[in-house]
Amino acid sequence: MGDARDILPVVEPDRDLDDWGRSARLSGALDRTLWEAAHKLWFRVELQQADRIPSTGGALLVVNGGGVLSPIGPLVAKAVREDHPRRRDPRLCVDRGVLDQPGLSVLLTRAGAVGAQVDDLARLLGDEGSLLVLSTRTDRLHDEGATEGLAGHPALVAAVRTGVPIIPIAAVGADDAQPVLGRLPLPGGRRLPVTLAFPHLGPLALLAYLPAKIRLRALSPLLPDTDAGTDPDAEVERLALSTARRLRHEHADMRRTRGSRWVG
């Protein structure tokens, strides 16, 4: 059999998609337009202690202020691209249920999102040494919410499996940009958020954010215990609790010391 290099091209100069389905043209256009305006003009995002995010290798960035309608994940990724010393480019972790929605799957994948599947995320964090952003709801930072939510999330499981650091990023302002007024029960135990714009404006609610000042603060890394005798499930739960408690404490401190929610 001949050398495979004689058959398969090494370089595909016209290829726009990477191995994860991300389109360089689409993600670049969104970064220069939508996320640039959101970062600098609308939310005026400020990232503190950016140097706590590793300059090389994989890491899981866990930020509070997440939710179905929250822009915090893409804003963290944009802030890292702008303010990190190495201007690294994180990927977004999106729950499989969101990617399964008609019309969203292709768009989010082309924009750079990656589905929450343990093996895929382990490859991204470990083999490719990428940064991965995982957002979680602020009201789920209590201990019970952490053990039920974060501890079972594929991203945290993948981080423990690969031994990459976990960087909590505390956020204030994200919950003010589209405050949740209540939640309607849905079949299966899920609850639909009700905001000033959703559900009555439908998809347009994704554009109806108040201009709250968003401040981010990267905290010291949490390192998984990779000793052979460590129980992976127990380690995931330990890190989930530690991450949630640190975010809860820092979020409360940042809210206490900030000025106006609109100007910081």
Image: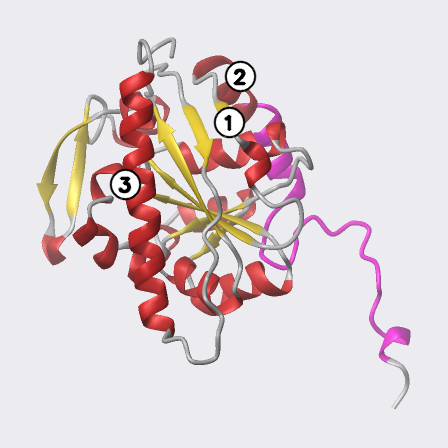
Between discs 1 and 2, the one toward the N terminus: 2
Mark 3 or 1: the one toward you: 1
- The kind of residue on which mark 3 rests is Arg
Q: Mark 2 points at which residue?
A: 40
Q: Does any portion of residue 117 appear in the rendered image? A: yes
Q: In which quarter of the image is residue 231?
A: bottom left
Sequence-earlier tag: 3 or 2:
2
Instruction: Give the Cα distance between marks 3 and 1.
Output: 19 Å
Q: In this view, does 240 lie above or below 120?
A: above
Taken as a whole, is the magenta stretch helix, strand or loop?
Answer: loop
Question: Quadrant of the rendered structure where residue 254 is?
Answer: top left
Task: Verify whether residue 12 appears in magenta.
Answer: yes
Task: Characterize the local packing of mark 3: few (<14), some (14-19) or many (20 or more) Cα atoms within 10 angstroms.
Answer: some
Q: Which mark is residue 137?
A: 3
Name the residue type under label 2.
Answer: Lys
Above or below residue 5? Residue 137 is above
Q: Name the residue under label 1.
A: 47
Residue 189: horizontal and vertical position, in percent? 11, 55
Q: In which quarter of the image is the C terminus?
A: top left
Q: In this view, does 73 lie to the left or right of 248?
A: right
Give the percent coordinates (x, y) of residue 15: 74, 52
Residue at (27, 29) in percent of width and height = 252
Q: Callout 1: few (<14), some (14-19), or many (20+) C-alpha neighbours within 10 Å?
A: many
Could you say whether the residue bearing mark 2 is in a helix, strand or loop? Answer: helix
Which is more toward the observer, 248 or 67?
A: 248
Element type at mark 3: loop
In the image, taking residue 13 as reference, residue 157 lies left or right, namely left
Q: What stretch is highlighted in magenta?
A: 4-33
Amino acid type of the residue tagged 1 in the rendering: Leu
